[in-house]
Image (cartoon, coloured by chain):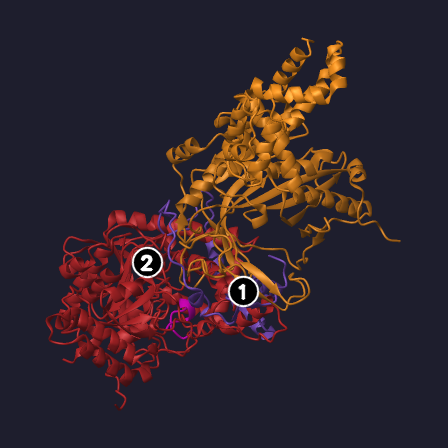
Chain colours: A orange, B red, C purple
Amino acid sequence: MTTPTIVKYEEALTRYEPVLGIETHIELGTNSKMFCGCPTTFGAEPNTQVCPVCLGLPGSLPVTNHAAIEGIIKIGLAFNCEIVEWCRFARKNYFYPDMPKNYQISQYDEPLCVDGHLDIEVEGETYRVEIERVHMEEDTGKSLHVGGATGRIHGADFSLVDYNRAGIPLVEIVTKPITATGDKAPLVARAYATELRELVRSIGVSDVRMEEGSMRCDVNVSLMPRGASEWGTRTETKNVNSLRSVERAVRSEIERQAAVLDAGRRVIQETRHFHEDTGVTTSGRSKEEAQDYRYFPEPDLVPMAPSREWVEELRATLPELPAARRKRVQREWSLSDLELRDVVNAGALDLIEATIAAGADAASARKWWMNELSRRATEQGVELTALPITPDQVARIQAMVVAGELNDKLARKVFEGVLAGEGTPDEVVAARGLKVVSDDGALAAIIDQVIADNAAVADKVRGGKVAAAGALVGAVMKASRGQADAGRARELILEKLGAS
Amino acid sequence: MTLIKKSAAELGALIASGEASAVEVAQAHLERVRAVDGQVHAFLHVDDEAVLAQARRVDERRAGGEELGPLAGVPIAHKDVFTTTDMPTTAGSKILEGWRPPYDATVTARLRKAGLVILGKTNMDEFAMGSSTENSAYGVTRNPWDLSRVPGGSSGGSSAAVAAYQAPLSTGTDTGGSIRQPAAVTGIVGTKPTYGGSSRYGIIAFASSLDTPGPFARNVLDAALLHEAFSGHDVMDSTSIDRAVPPVVEAARRADVNGLRVGVVKEFAGEGYQAGVLNRFNETVELLESLGAKVVEVGCPSFAYALPAYYLIAPSEASSNLARFDAMRYGLRVADDGTRSAEEIMALTRAQGFGPEVKRRIMLGTYALSSGYYDAYYGKAQQVRTLIARDFDNAFEQVDVLVSPTTPTTAFPIGERADDPMAMYLADLCTIPSNLTGNAAISVPCGLADEDGLPVGLQIMAPVLGDDRVYRVGAAVEKALEDRWGGPLLAKAPELAEAAK
Amino acid sequence: MSAITRDEVAHLARLSRLALGEDELDHLAAQLDQIISAVARVQEVTAEEIPPTSHALPLTNVYRADEVRPSLTPEQALAGAPAAEEQRFRVPRILDEEA
């Protein structure tokens, strides 16, 4: 008899309670590497950004990048951490070909930032994720696996290593165990990663691009039977390269572990890898022996003792953080919780705020970005920010609407023109001849023609059926290619037909 | 007197005045190397043409009116642990055979800038682990005083080169005594500067918190001149001290001890110390007193734990420092037949590329750091380090310098301790405390032991950044003893037979 | 009783990535046992309140400015490599997914 390999998610949650832990690595966007002066440009030719230090050549020594320490302290402050008064780097010893020294300069029992928290919202409910530590370390090189079928490590004949990434400053943010999330666990994990990304991006220390690897999540999951108090054995899933994958990886691990436990077997403490294509995790090679990293204080670097003055200076440089900003925006723009969430999820916050700054009112700015432009972005399958239109341009179009030079319908045509690359809003208006016609003389000529063409309808209006005038207005709009001022046209029609 | 017997200061003056050219001086030393290095084997690499080219450049710089330092044109033997772009750098190990670094160590760069002519790279215990230079993968170096004996270690090639008049100066590194002990057993001067006073950048690391580059010379003033030439703050070394180099040359010239308080370390005597070593040491202490020093005995009870603490800390750091030699980016790679994994190639290469002492220390260090043992070994060793620092602090409240024999015995016969690590480790008994706390120390010759007629060294220790004091006292002792002997101790060494030219 | 077992020595060799033969392990086990017994003297220091010292000098806060300095050329970087290909270091196949 074979046991099932997964238990359906909803069913798993009836018997088990998940406990999560998330470790996030962030590459800082400094000019030079963590411990040497090599540049950090993404995508450079292989082994062009290396020197004796980051190649780990015999005799070389590390010297700490001041801007990296500033960056991590800002992150620590943004996560409400305590910045310790004294700490050291430590060496984490293990052999791996992409790690030039076969030890990683990291921090062990003396992280720079400790005891923080991050509040996140999931379906209207707030969860506080406790942060255990934020510490500083260096990135590794990258291997290209050659031979075999898939370019994956298994079955490869050999590997080619590029050390450009080796030594790029890496900040690791580690949560405390996240409990009592119940069936929301995958959503909580995703919301945490999302909020973390927003927060780090807002303080400008990293571009936090998961697709380029400048933000990477490892997700720990364990299950315990409902009502139990002792946590189960956890697995650590790596390779989680998008926010959606964070959610899917947690869900998939819950389903898999539930099946293992249901079958009366033990969950093995191991590293697992998430596969975007199949949405499941697979086991990394199980180790015959537990890792023993032999941490000890890094003798080549002196301890860090950030002064309280420096920490406060850095705190003062922090911009408004995302949570506070959302609260302010919700108040200023009079949004419901749901509306705010839509704006945030659409990634429209910055755009709307910039549009308002350029002179538009909040409601209109939101309307254009969330309706017209969101629709077009969806059609084209791109992010809002990727549309070829600026907040200034949106504000300019809205200004023309306010001035009565455009109506909504014409405004949409201007958007269409700008997005099609026809120029600025003013250029599109001029080129396409998009102006509201409210001049009585011009309108009167069109109306006369419409009345003549629609004699039967005109008679009904004359006979007192004022509602029928709508059809005439529509015809006027059509004849003017939408440029007529519809309100004024209606007034003139009723006047001419003696129905006013 | 021939050029090779002159001091570095004298050679520098001759070249500066134009009485000798740097090329002539280099040629004289190259000839000496050719004549005696077949017996001594101080050098791993000498390239005559490259040496003469360096010397020519110095002569040209001088001719072009450039203001050069006091050692410009003076030849120097460079320990093979410093990276050099124009010469191989092996650290005495097979695993780095033929490696040409793409960068110069800071010390190398400063030697070049000062116009010193680098004669070649000297033999050493593999990765500076040892006290005899027998652990080199490239053969033993012999003590010019007695070719059947070791020249000390790990900087044995550098001590032998200077003692054999192949170079007036050489560089070394001192992690547990690797400059002072070889200086003592070859009858020359060797200094371990204050840790952080001279840059470690480009020194192939043994134990990062202990490694210190320093000078060898045949007299105290020469050592001070070299010390000054390559020391001082370096932004490439985070542990480098951002302060002026102590006035070591001035101190070496001053050479007096009048009114100075000298402490004799009580613990460094007794069992395990050769009688002839203690006799010369005690006479030298009496000499210091006669020169006007105030001598007292000082207790440093924790020094008894220095050796065990050192043999935990140094191997621990070494086990990590030497992890990079893995056959992936540089150096030796064996057994890569296309079927083996990176993991297997690493382990096979390391097993073949490292010698027994290096493997022993890697294993010991791995043990001391591994989970379950860290607190009992590495952790305790670090506490001992604190206690030793307290002993030094306490001592230096009472005295200006501390003195002891540099090493408990004279040079031992080649092979005698080769497979007895504990016996070998005892050679560093007196030198290790200063490495653990980073303070300055020197070894100067203080006579020959009665039993074997071999040199004995006096160790002088001063507080951190008190480097000038060790030169001041060392120079005073040197002056008084040379007056007594009628010349330097090295003049008593047997003449080496020169190979046919 | 010995301070370290033959199995522990074999384990240390694996941790240290040293492919040691049986004879070498036997020889090392005996020597390490002797050395470890000797250095265990540090455990006579029992006072708990003694702070550990990791660095020779009490320096703190040594940083460099975030400025780019010239890197090596790829030719220099790869000059010492046992094998190189496509401007990268060629290494034998890697077993572990990651350590």
Q: Nearer the viewer, residue B285 or C12?
A: C12
- Indicate the secondary structure of the residue bearing disc 1: helix
Q: Are marks 2 and 1 in contact (CB under 8 Å)?
A: no
**Which portion, as a residue range, is magenta?**
B124-135
Residue under label 2, please give it. Answer: B199
User: If the image is split into quadrants, where does the N terminus of chain B sit?
Assistant: bottom left
Dot 2, crowdedness within 10 Å: few (<14), some or many (≥20)? many
Does the segment drawn in magenta span residue A393? no
Does the segment drawn in magenta span residue B129? yes
Please give the name of the residue rendered at 43% of the width and 49% of the height, measured from the top-left corner: B383
Q: Where residue B459 sits: x, y (%)?
A: 27, 62
Q: Where residue A46 sits: x, y (%)?
A: 50, 61
Q: Where residue A148 sits: x, y (%)?
A: 67, 66
Residue under label 1, please give it. Answer: C33
Vertical arrangement, residue B299 with respect to residue A387, above or below:
below
Q: Nearer the viewer, residue B20 or C50?
A: B20
Q: CA distance from mark 2 to mark 1?
A: 36 Å
User: If the image is split into quadrants, where does the C terminus of chain B sit?
Assistant: bottom left
Please give the name of the residue rendered at 45% of the width and 53% of the height, measured from the top-left corner: B381
Can residue B4 be seen in the rendering of this structure?
Answer: no
Which residue lies most toward the bottom here?
B500
Identify the amino acid type marked 2. Answer: Ser
Numbered tag placed on residue B149 in the rendering: none
Vertical arrangement, residue A484 with respect to residue B250, above or below:
above
Task: Report whether mark 2 lies on the same chain as mark 1.
Answer: no
